[in-house]
Image (tube, coloured by chain):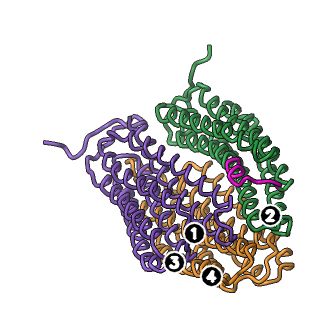
Chain colours: A purple, B orange, C green
């Protein structure tokens, strides 16, 4: 017979119940899958015409809205649970960090539509591919929080991808201001899109940092 | 006879004294009223000439400074109190979130003056009206933290207003880059103002999220 | 004989061991010295040609990387220590706030290189000098956390410098949009640099706020 919880000694010397309930990991994995869906939808949007983008935008908005509700569900569950697998604040902040990823991705899609952009710089595709990969790795890693095993590979690879994305980002800015785009208005638009994509990559790195922080504490 | 405090059982099973001292709610309400004053002053500034704006700017700065001191007073009181109505960190973060609202409003005023803007896009008035309404609702809600009653109406309405403000914001960006303003320098200025107003609206939504978080915990 | 620790009563009425181990202060001081090194390197970069900047940029990146590792070392030490001189979260947040300073300084250097800027507005030097002074004061203050003495002078002076930096920042924006730079692309570049420097100054002020918060708690 497996007990539904175990006792372990916490930092201040008390014993607290550690729930074996896996639903927190499932909720966090769900949230990360919304980020994957958003990244895939944005990839599709960036590769198509301004008009088709406008038609796809509401779907991206829907994904972002669902991610928002998933985050609320996690926070609500944390605040109404006596015991959680980790510190309450660690789960809340991890959930919020995951939500930020989807929010940043959605903001790129929204902005591309508002700016009715044509002729996006081609290297933006490479920047987007890094984000898709980060989202996938994050979604794969979340269920491993249940055992705290094989998480290091995840955050090391996220850091590597972040560096890769950063190099692409810098190359894009260098080209943008090096004459690749001459119309100042188009420069403003491109700068905005490129920076928002970089913020999305940073948001995934932030998730990895939080997972690393939890792993160190639990070690 | 009413006792000045009651005992209640907290999360980890201890009993702690719950102060009936209302001064925390008063301080939070005071802070929110500074945001209302800042929003009203900014409304006046946006509706007048560049020269008159410059004359009003120091008054807006004064309001922001008072809000800063109010925030410091709250944080000082929290850190020197043994018991507070909520978790110490919840009050500190709520106070900081309220202060952010006033800071963002002040930054719009300061920026409009620095840019010596003439011919502001008219729809900015609509964006500003939403912020005034958010500030008023926030100031009305703060005293209700004492009883934790009728707070849901507040955060639901703030969320609705945030969506309304977001739609106005997106419409403004669409028009701005759709040719409403042709001089690139003026586009840069407008983009900055519109984005700062959107950040002010987000700051009020952030306050509502924190109030919702406290309400869930206390439920 | 000096005991390696003393007992003191904490907020919730328990006694906890207060370590006299000074290594936390040393680590925080090390982190602040990285910010000083970064500020000095950036000063050198801003005062030289676009080509020489490109050659110096990797050195600035190295400093930022070392600061990153110093921050990780602090967080690791906090999470693996049973007792720390202050609350765990206060040290983690202070370390992260110090790291932000170096990150913002590095981002200015990186951006100046990417934009291949010539003819920087001269007043940027004054903005930079304030940041160097803030970095130095911060590095001098960190070891004083061990005794909590003479810290008030530090944060009062940081606040004064932040106001001074803010006035320079506003003057720069006013000149920039008042016609000092006419090419819109150059305006975009300058606005970015000036704002990133202002963010670096804000990051030092944030460190001072955290130190003040710790001092109030410990009083």
Q: Which residue is mark 4?
A: B178
The answer to whether dots 2 and 3 both sit on one chain is no
Q: Earlier in the sequence, mark 1 or mark 3?
A: 3
Chain of the residue where label 3 is placed in the rendered structure: B
| Image-based side of C89 in relation to B124, left or right | left
What is the CA distance from the residue labelled 4 to the residue labelled 1? 25 Å
Identify the residue at image location x=59%, y=57%.
Answer: A172
| Image-based side of A26 in relation to B36, left or right | left
Relative to C215, residue A198 above or below: below
Relative to A136, residue A9 above or below: above
Q: Toward the viewer: A86 or B127?
A: B127
Q: Secondary structure at mark 4?
A: helix
Q: Which residue is mark 3?
A: B163
In the rendered structure, are the residues bearing label 2 and label 4 in contact, judged by CB atoms less than 8 Å apart?
Answer: no
Q: Earlier in the sequence, mark 4 or mark 1?
A: 4
Query: Mark 1, residues whose alpha carbon is within 10 Å: few (<14), some, or many (≥20)?
Result: many
What is the CA distance from the residue labelled 1 to the residue labelled 2? 25 Å
Q: Nearer the viewer, mark 2 or mark 3?
A: 2
The answer to whether dots 3 and 4 both sit on one chain is yes
Chain of the residue where label 1 is placed in the rendered structure: B
Identify the residue at image location x=75%, y=34%.
Answer: C140
Whether residue A196 is visible here, answered yes or no, is yes
> Split into 4 quadrants, where in the image is the C terminus of chain A?
top left
Q: Which residue is mark 1?
A: B202
- Residue A87 sits inside the magenta stretch: no
- Which residues are drawn in magenta? C109-120
Chain of the residue where label 4 is placed in the rendered structure: B
Tell me the tag on residue B38.
none
Chain of the residue where label 2 is placed in the rendered structure: C
Q: Secondary structure at mark 2?
A: helix
């Amino acid at each position: 017979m497996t007990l539904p919880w175990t006792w372990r000694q916490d930092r201040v010397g008390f014993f607290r119940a550690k729930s074996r309930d896996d639903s927190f990991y499932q909720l966090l994995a769900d949230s990360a899958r919304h980020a994957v869906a958003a990244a895939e939808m944005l990839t599709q949007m960036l590769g198509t015409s301004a008009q088709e983008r406008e038609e796809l935008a509401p779907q991206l908005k829907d994904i972002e809205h669902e991610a928002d509700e998933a985050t609320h569900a996690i926070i609500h569950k944390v605040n109404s649970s006596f015991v959680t697998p980790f510190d309450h604040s660690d789960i809340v902040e991890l959930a919020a960090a995951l939500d930020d990823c989807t929010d940043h991705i959605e903001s790129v899609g929204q902005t591309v539509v508002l700016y009715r952009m044509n002729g996006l710089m081609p290297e933006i595709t490479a920047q987007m591919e890094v984000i898709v990969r980060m989202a996938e790795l994050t979604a794969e890693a979340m269920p491993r929080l249940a055992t705290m095993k094989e998480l290091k590979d995840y955050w090391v690879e996220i850091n590597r991808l972040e560096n890769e994305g950063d190099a692409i980002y810098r190359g894009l800015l260098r080209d943008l201001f090096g004459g690749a785009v001459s119309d100042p208005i188009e420069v403003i638009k491109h700068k905005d899109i490129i920076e928002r994509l970089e913020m999305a990559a940073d948001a995934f790195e932030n998730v990895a940092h939080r997972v690393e922080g939890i792993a160190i504490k639990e070690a």
